[in-house]
Image: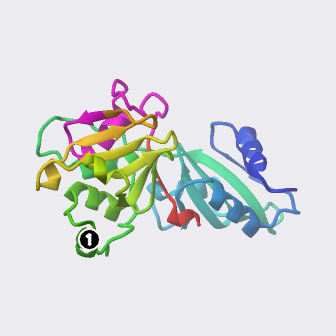
Amino acid sequence: MELTQMTVNGLLAELGSGDGYLYLPGDIDPQEFTDLLDTLLLDGGVVDPAVDDSKGAALLHLFEGRAVTIRAWAYGSQWVGTGTARGDEGSERAVFAVTHREVPDAPALSPDEDVDWVDQLTRITGWTYPAERPDVDWAGLEARLGSRLPSDYKRMVETFGEGAFDAFLSLHQEPWIHLKDDGLLAWAGTEHEDQYCWRLDGDDPDRWPVVVRSFDGDDTTFGCRTAEFVCRILTDPHHPYTMARYFDTHWFMNYATSE
């Protein structure tokens, strides 16, 4: 069987929206199929019976003790996994499995200035992984940029690492300076070529407003900080840049785990 995106789409369609698994044809190499999913799906990680359902262990329950090695990916409101399990005859076979992914309900977002918006963002996305970039040299980066950076942005990068919210809003690991002549630093971008920026107003980066520069050069300013802006576009269906109209659950796609 040729392994392509169509292969994966066909298997997902065959399993439907419920919980289930399939034994794959004998000519499929389990490692080759795992590598394919690693390039097509989202957060990767090997799971075992010691981890909880927030890490994909629910896939193991489908096999009732017959799983040998299962790798799981967060895929919206599903866990998708592949690896090997023992068949009825006891031999080890390649498998593909899908089960429901529990994602915490989005918390009520308060205008209170004391809200920890990075913490809210981890809850909204169901992010439970350890910090992806805990040792970033912010001092060196800020020296090169000639400016300090917003503290919540730095926490977002440290927490999530390189990737995209809802596989759409890509978080820059270093601000892009190509708009600096316009007084802007870009901290994220979308596949629609919108740039999410800060306007460099004043010496306190934690007070810089978020500015969205559209692909055609129009600017829209929002009087909030970085993490709050992301929380609101994920959850508020009335926000002008909402993603809540398109996704019922939210996640972060970490690029490093898919290489």
Residue 196 position by quadrant: top left
- Return the residue found at the far front: 181
Was residue 226 drawn as part of the magenta stretch in this picture?
yes
What residue type is disc 1 on? Trp
Q: Which residue is at 74% across, 62% downward? A: 33
Was residue 20 drawn as part of the magenta stretch in this picture?
no
Residue 35 as seen in the image, left or right of residue 129 = right
In the image, is residue 113 above or below residue 241?
Answer: below
Q: Toward the viewer: 153 or 11?
A: 153
Residue 256 as seen in the image, left or right of residue 219 = right
Q: Tell me residue 257's x, y (percent).
A: 53, 65
Q: Which residue is mark 1?
A: 138
Q: Which residue is at 43% across, 44% downward? A: 103
Query: Magenta stretch?
Result: 220-249
Say which quadrant the N terminus sits in.
bottom right
Residue 171 as seen in the image, left or right of residue 42 = left
Residue 226 in view (yes/no): no
Q: Toward the viewer: 243 or 12?
A: 243
Q: Tell me residue 22's x, y (percent).
A: 75, 51
Secondary structure of the residue carrying tag 1 is helix
Q: Tell me residue 127's x, y (percent).
A: 39, 54
Q: Toward the viewer: 78 or 53?
A: 78
Label count reads: 1
Residue 105 as seen in the image, left or right of residue 255 = left
In the image, is residue 231 above or below residue 66?
Answer: above
Residue 100 in view (yes/no): yes
Q: Tell me residue 71's x, y (percent).
A: 61, 63
Say which quadrant the C terminus sits in.
bottom right
Q: Which residue is at 44% across, 61% downward? A: 162
